[in-house]
Every structure is written in C-alpha cells, then in structure tokens.
Image: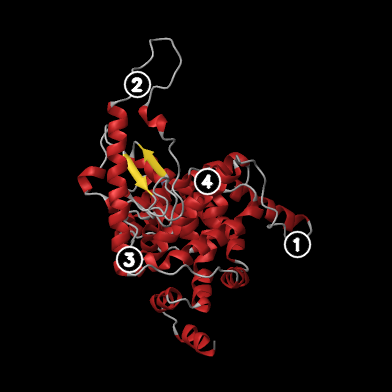
Amino acid sequence: MDDMIHDASTAQCPTDLLAAARAGDRLAMSRLIEAELPWVRAVVAGYVQASENVDDICQEVFIAVWQSLHRLRSPAGFKAWIYRIAVNKVRSFYRRAGRRSSVELSADLQAGDGREALERSSRRESVLAALKKMPPKYRDPLVIHYLRGKSCDETAEILGLRPVTCRIRLLRGRSRLEDLLRKDGAL
Amino acid sequence: MKNMTCEQAREFLAAREMKLPFEPEAAHACEQHLAGCESCRRVLLEGRELSELLAASLAPYAEGAEELAERIAIDLPARRAAPSYWRSQVFRFDAAAAALLFGAGLFVGWWFRPAPPPAGAPGPVAPAATVAPQLIGSSGTLAHELLPRDRVRTSERRRFIIVNPVAPDVILEVDRQAEFEDRLELPDGAGAGDVPVE
Ligand SMILES: [Zn+2]
C-alpha cells in the first residue's frame, strides 16, 4: 500500500499516471479522475436536466474508464476517449430510465443570500439553462474550452475535431449563447 | 489586413476572448477599427462580461472535484482481468466466425423470406424484423475489428453487424454509420476505429 501511494505521488506526468492507473493503482486513477472530472461533469450536465443525476453518471463514466483502461492503446487519445464514453453513458442513462428531459434548473448553484447574490446566481442559472438549449455540437466545445484552460488544440483533441472546425464551433457556439442570453435578458 | 468590417472585428474580439489563435496583424486592424467604432467598443465590453459570466457559471463543476474523484476512486469495482494477447486473438477469431455465420444466416433468411402479403394487408415486411436490433452489452466488439474492411464499410445496401463476443446471440444491426455510432454502447465497442482498442 505504501508503495502504491509512493508510485502515484511521484508519477506527476499524466502519462505516468495513466500507466499507473492501468496497472491498477487507484490513487493514480483518482488523480486522473480529479483532473478530468470538471469538464466531464459539465459536459454531462449539458445533456441531463436533473442535476442530481450528473455525478452518478460521472461515476459510471469513470468506472467504465477504469474497467477498460487496458484497451486504450495510446495515452494521447485518453481524453477524447473519455468524452465519447461520457456521451454514451448519458445516452444509456436515458435509455435505461426511459426518461425525457424535463426542465429543472440545477439547485447546486444557489449560493449566498441577499439580492445581489440571488441575482448573480440567477444569471448563472440562465447561462446553464441557455447552454442546455444549445445543440451539443456547439455546447460541448464551449464547455470543454472554458473548463480546460481555453486551449484550442486540447478542446479539438478531446472532441476529435480538427482545430479549424473546433474554432468555428467555438465562435458559433459563443454567438448562439450570446443570442440566447440576450433573449432571456441575462446579458 | 486593413479596414476591418464590424463583423470581422466582432469575430476577432470573440476569438481573442476565447484565446483562439489569430494573426497578429488582425489585432492591429481591430484596434484601429475599435478606435473609430463605438458599437464595437461596446461589443468588446459585453464580450468580456459574457466570458466572465460563462466562466462563473461553469466554475461549480470544478468545485469539489477532488472529493468526488476520491469517492469515485474508492468505490471503483475490482477490475476485470485484461485478456492476454493470445486469448484476445482467439476471442477475435471466434467472434469473427460468429459474425460471418450470422451474416450468412441473415442472407439466407432474407433469401428465403416469406412472400410479402398483398398490398393493404398488415404484416411484417422487413427481414431485419426477424432479429430485433439490440444494443450490445459492454463487451461488444465492432464488426470493424472482426471482419475485413470491405465487408463492414457501409453503403446503402450493406449493414453494420455488431456482435458481442461474450454473447454472440446479442447482435446489433444498423443501416448507417451515424446510427451505428449512436447506438453503440461505449467503451468496449469504443468508437468506429479511432478509439484505441487492443
Ligand atoms: Zn464596428
């Protein structure tokens, strides 16, 4: 056990972490999950209306990643692979449950009290609601881009798009979001 | 680049907000445009506001990632044993054989399908209805891997056949690449070729 902890803490490079996780190191896996979770969560949340399902689906995503890590041949494809797993887990979630999306805003964003805080949180909810209304092809790039430090190449890589295509989708997505927020009075 | 239009300036501003690559001379042209265009200056400010709002709205997804990651990692089930190289090759061969047999079966079934009922009469028409398309389980393997490429690449007439090597009776049959990808259960069937599969 000590060895495992030692391995994971010295393996800082994502490729090393990946190799350690592949070999069954849960601590390394937890580091990998931690690094990828924010954008996976946001992507999943874009498809799912009830926010309480998001973390459950994320858990399913990472269980699938864990179980199939030995199938991943190239570490470079890791994030793109996770993205596809995430989208498919959302699909199977809906299929299993026979659910249709119903509009329900996320409750986890209610923060603070006072009118200003309320207004701020309601604007954020408007953004999330607007994102949910957007087609995934425009929403996912935007969400990933903002949660992965705005690297165009990395966003493109996760989505399996050419950087040029990704750039166009980001620009269109942003402008769609802007239109939706204007219509909603949130901008 | 000179004389940027408002449209070009706004696209540039949006790109810069998102840290997308741009040509240095575009930055210069945009500055010039902004100097003489009040409405684009307003767009610049609104664009910043949009970026901040979007970042703030998404930030909660990053919050608590550490705890959740830890919880997920602790609850990870025991891992299935990875198949050895040789075992997976044999596995593939079995699955390929199953796929070929199934394909042949479909063809025979289609060939000897019952005559269609007279017009107006209700009744099954499509031969595929004899096997309800079913989504493969988590151990599915793509026809891509199992069959020579020319047998899998779809045209209007050819169909994708996906066989689960663990339970070869569970078969997914679809017409188009898009449908194939839509209905594919990842990760074990992960991706039509581009997701690495050993
Ligand atoms: Zn202008």
Q: Which residue is mark 2?
A: B114
Please state if B37 lies on the left or on the right of B53 as rendered: left
- Badges 4 and 2, same chain: no
Numbered label attached to residue A154? none
Q: Residue at x 32, y 31 (%)?
A: B109
Can you see residue B35?
no
Q: Residues within 10 Å of mark 1 (few under 14, many from 20)?
A: few
Question: Of A126 and B16, which appears nearest the observer?
Answer: A126
> What amino acid is labelled 4 in the image?
Glu
Q: Which residue is mark 1?
A: A112
Question: Of B21 and B88, which appears nearest the observer?
Answer: B88
What's the chain of the residue with tag 1?
A
What's the chain of the residue with tag 4?
A
Numbered label attached to residue B87? 3
Q: Residues within 10 Å of mark 4 (few under 14, many from 20)?
A: some
> What amino acid is labelled 1 in the image?
Gly
Callout 4 touching callout 1 (CB < 8 Å): no
Tell me the mark number nearer the camera, choosing from 1 and 3.
Answer: 3
